[in-house]
Image (cartoon, helix red, strand yellow):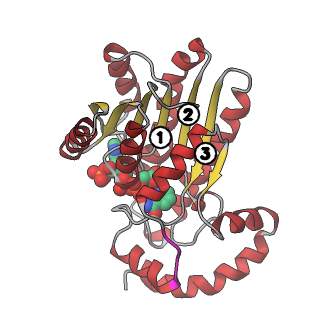
Amino acid sequence: MKLSGKKILVTGAAGGIGSELCLALAGKGAILHLVDIDVTRLEQLRQAIQASGGKAGVFLCDLSAPHASEVLAQQLQDTVGSVDILINCAGIASFGLFDQQNPDQMEKLWRINVIAPMQLTRALLPGMLSRGHGRVVNVGSIFGSIGFAYFTAYSASKFAMRGFSEALRRELEGSGVGVTYIAPRYTRTAINDGPVNRMAQAVGMNSDDPSTVAMHVVRAIEKDRNDYYIGWPESLFVRINALLPRLVDGALRKQNIKTRPFALGH
Ligand SMILES: NC(=O)c1ccc[n+]([C@@H]2O[C@H](COP(=O)([O-])OP(=O)(O)OC[C@H]3O[C@@H](n4cnc5c(N)ncnc54)[C@H](OP(=O)(O)O)[C@@H]3O)[C@@H](O)[C@H]2O)c1
């Protein structure tokens, strides 16, 4: 899909990947609708986009709140009408032993990472379908294909987004509306706190800059890609895990011994 002149809603716009992505999309001539929970960073991003000649509007929204997506979709409808592309990028992570997760925090993670993207897609889809074109872009993770110890709730949420993307894509076949599932690997942004970064360093995890991820997302949209896995050999491991999961169990067993102390907060 050509991006020039397209109206694009991006959640998590003020975040590490989101902000680089919005700047890249604006540079392609897209009109951005920026959604995030942090008004200061949203305004800074809008100003940066406008300073470089782009167009952007701001929607403040806490996607973990009940009915947030419906309220946002209505605000959008009342102000700018429908959008051509929805990018579900907002997300939170959790790292630690599963039995020590805070139940409220786990529910919040599920609301932000899964429920809000599904509800927002549901609300914005009729506009795309009535025009016979559009694209939903779901930002998943390599952990959405390879269940990763100590990221259990997060991994599960990204598996859900991958399943949602695949099923919806099949449901929408022939409608003119496509679905892209994009899976970054470990990326240097604020979602990863101290223990995660120390663990990643200890096991030698490959990483990307958010600007690199943004470049891949833009490419995936321009090429109307269904699935897009970022990074080598991570994209190979995804395929091996799908075919031979017990082989990956063995490989990760050794790594888990190294990651566990970080998950315990040491
Ligand atoms: N970084 C990685 O290693 C990595 C790897 C694979 C996939 N991803 C995925 O990439 C996406 C973007 O992550 P990122 O790395 O750019 O992280 P990030 O810098 O933390 O960006 C996430 C953005 O979502 C916002 N957000 C959080 N809770 C929200 C809520 N309730 N309502 C509205 N917005 C909310 C955050 O705001 P606050 O900062 O104010 O919380 C932040 O601006 C996520 O879906 C993540 O799962 C990241």
Check disc 1 and give the amino acid type: Asn
Is residue 19 rendered magenta in the image? no
> Quick one: which residue is furthest to the front in this view?
53
Check disc 2 and give the amino acid type: Val
Which mark is on residue 88? Answer: 1
Indicate the quadrant containing the N terminus: top left, top right, bottom left or bottom right.
top right
Q: Secondary structure at mark 1?
A: strand
Q: Return the residue nearer the eye: 121 or 183.
A: 183
Q: Specify the segment rendered in magenta.
A: 203-207
Circle 1/circle 2 CB separation < 8 Å: yes
Q: Is mark 3 within 8 Å of ligand 1?
A: no
Q: Tell me where residue 193 appears, x and y as whole percent.
A: 34, 69
Q: Residue at x 48, y 73 (%)?
A: 97
Q: Tell me where residue 149 appears, x and y as whole percent.
A: 57, 72
* C-alpha distance separating marks 3 and 1: 10 Å
**Mark 3 residue crowding within 10 angstroms, few (<14) / some (14–19) / many (20+):** many
Q: Is mark 1 within 8 Å of ligand 1?
A: yes
**Mark 2 residue crowding within 10 angstroms, few (<14) / some (14–19) / many (20+):** many
Check disc 3 and give the amino acid type: Tyr
Q: Secondary structure at mark 2?
A: strand
Indicate the quadrant containing the C terminus: top left, top right, bottom left or bottom right.
bottom left
Q: Residue 106, can we see it? A: no
Q: Tell me where residue 112 appears, x and y as whole percent.
A: 42, 45
Q: Tell me where residue 13 appears, x and y as whole percent.
A: 35, 43
**Mark 1 residue crowding within 10 angstroms, few (<14) / some (14–19) / many (20+):** many
Is residue 206 rendered magenta in the image? yes
* C-alpha distance separating marks 2 and 3: 9 Å
